[in-house]
Image (cartoon, rainbow, N blue to C red):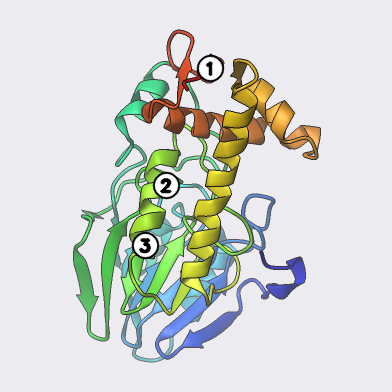
Amino acid sequence: MQAPDEFNPTPGRVYRLAPGLRRILAPNPSPMTYRGTNTYLLGETDIAVIDPGPLSDAHLHAILDALEPGQRISHIFVTHTHLDHSPLAAPLSTRTGATILAFGGPQAGRSAVMTKLARHGLAGGGEGIDSDFRPDIELEDGESVAAEDWQLEVIHTPGHLGNHVALAWNDICFTADHVMGWASSLVSPPDGDLTDFMAACRRLRARDWSVFHPGHGAPINAPRARLDWLIQHRLDREAQILEVLAQAPATAQQLAQRIYTETPKALLPAAERNVFAHLVDLTGRSRVSPDGELSATACFRRID
């Protein structure tokens, strides 16, 4: 994990990360976004903006002011439709004429089990959904998008959100909120699906990367080690849940209270969401079973 003072760029300032790659931090720090959302500018002529960020006039002007003579914004990539990543896409497109590309609208890529939970009234949590977002072009897993001096491969990485994608630029990957160095990714049903999250982590791990550029926080210079940590972190939490359930059936709320003993009370609802994400995954793998319908308030028992 990165220490709090290791990544503290000035919002609106342009940082050159590599030839053809710059980063601008949006002015939206919070407990969910760390220092703010990272917006990336890729290219030297036709510029791809990756994650334009939240609605912010200051950030819009910072992106436009970053353009150098002979440069234009041709593509706007949105990795997922949380409110800290996608809302500025439309105003930026209006100002530049650039095409907005994303995996789809807010419900795209949502798994069947999460669709059912949402239909039965479970609401999302976390950063909030950009419910009005619609891309000009819907991306497909595995496709490539190219301009004069860059090419990006789309990797569908659901888990944090069903429509979440990572973008590969040679051996560099823009991982958005799927892999970050300052915290583990939020997985909050019905928007987040832990089964999908773990599969996407293992998919990314199967490739050789030099660096990850996340949606929040500093570059990750040891991508495989970070993925190993994320996977093991989730496996350790799963083991804790199964250990408690071996003693007696429990709800997600009861499990969170038993497991997150050092967590401030105000953060326990988020912990409960995390536990429920694990319970949904464990139910799908026949490791636990709810009494009655699968829901956030159900009592779960371990299947030995």
Mark toward the start of the polypeptide (3 vs 1): 3
| Distance from the alpha carbon under mark 2 to that under mark 1 | 23 Å
Three-letter amino acid code at the position of disc 2: Phe
Left or right: 144 with respect to 63? left
In the image, 209 versus 135, the foreground residue is: 209
295 to 2, vertically: above or below: above
Residue 24's quadrant in the figure?
A: bottom right
31 to 180, vertically: above or below: above
In the image, 18 versus 113, the foreground residue is: 113
- Evaluate whether residue 39 shows in this view: no
- Mark 3, residue position: 204
167 to 279, vertically: above or below: below
- How many marks are shown on the rendered structure? 3
Identified at 56% across, 83% down, the residue is: 15
| Distance from the alpha carbon under mark 3 to that under mark 2 | 11 Å
Asked if the residue under mark 1 is in contact with the one under mark 2, i.e. CB atoms within 8 Å, the reply is no
Identified at 46% across, 88% down, the residue is: 18
Residue 279's spot in the image, x, y percent? 50, 28
Three-letter amino acid code at the position of disc 1: Arg
Mark toward the start of the polypeptide (2 vs 1): 2
- Mark 1, residue position: 301
Residue 30's spot in the image, x, y percent? 68, 53
- Evaluate whether residue 69 shows in this view: yes
Residue 303's spot in the image, x, y percent? 47, 20
Three-letter amino acid code at the position of disc 3: Leu
146 to 234, vertically: above or below: below
| Distance from the alpha carbon under mark 3 to that under mark 1 | 32 Å
Residue 104's spot in the image, x, y percent? 28, 47
In the image, 131 versus 3, the foreground residue is: 3
Mark toward the start of the polypeptide (3 vs 2): 2
- Mark 2, residue position: 197
* Callout 1 crowding tier (Cα within 10 Å): few <14, some 14–19, many ≥20: many
